[in-house]
Amino acid sequence: MNDLSEQLKKLFPDHQPSNEPEPVDDSPHELYVQKEPMICQYEKRKGKPTTIISGYEGTDEDFKILAKEIKSKFAVGGSFKDGEIIIQGDYRDKIMQFLKDKGFKTKRVGG
């Protein structure tokens, strides 16, 4: 480690290292909870069951965070595309309960 700092001193002789720790933002990100229900629908794409969640009114970044939470909680594959979360498999009931626990309203569509 000392070797690296020596190399950096040679490259940047005028640099003064600061001893202040970098601020870390540990606060959880607050998602926008809307009044209108999100639509949770079942569809078959290329012969495989998929669960599609759409109708989120917040930012795309919040929706991506929500997609990541859903995928990690249920250990499923999926993607975020064109304002929709696409989850592999039929997980409507579990996802709707998860969203309800987070304060979202959901509406079941199809099947």
Image (cartoon, helix red, strand yellow):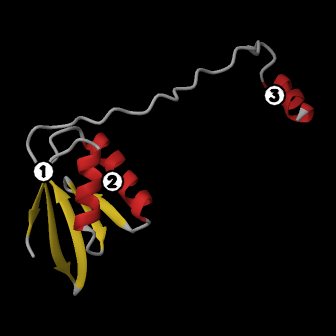
| Mark found first going from the N terminus, 3 or 2 | 3
Q: Which residue is mark 3?
A: 8
Assign a secondary structure to mark 2: helix
Q: Which residue is mark 1?
A: 55
Q: Closer to the observer: label 3 or label 2?
A: 2
Residue 99: give x, y in percent of width and height. Answer: 26, 50
When asked about the image quadrant of residue 52, the answer is bottom left
- 16 up-or-down from 46: above or below: above
Quarter of the picture containing the N terminus is top right
Q: Nearer the viewer, residue 8 or 48?
A: 48
Residue 77: give x, y in percent of width and height. Answer: 39, 68
Q: Nearer the viewer, residue 92 or 88?
A: 92
Residue 13: give x, y in percent of width and height. Answer: 81, 17
Figure disc tally = 3
Q: Which residue is mark 2?
A: 67
Whether tag 2 and tag 1 are in contact, CB under 8 A, the answer is no
Crowding at label 3, few (<14), some or many (≥20) Cα neighbours within 10 Å?
A: few
Assign a secondary structure to mark 3: helix
Crowding at label 1, few (<14), some or many (≥20) Cα neighbours within 10 Å?
A: some
- Where residue 102 is drawn, which disc sits there? none
The residue lying at 23 percent from left, 41 percent from top is: 103
Compute the Cα span from label 3 to label 1. Answer: 50 Å
Residue reaching furthest to the bottom: 47
Query: Label 1 is placed on what type of residue?
Result: Gly
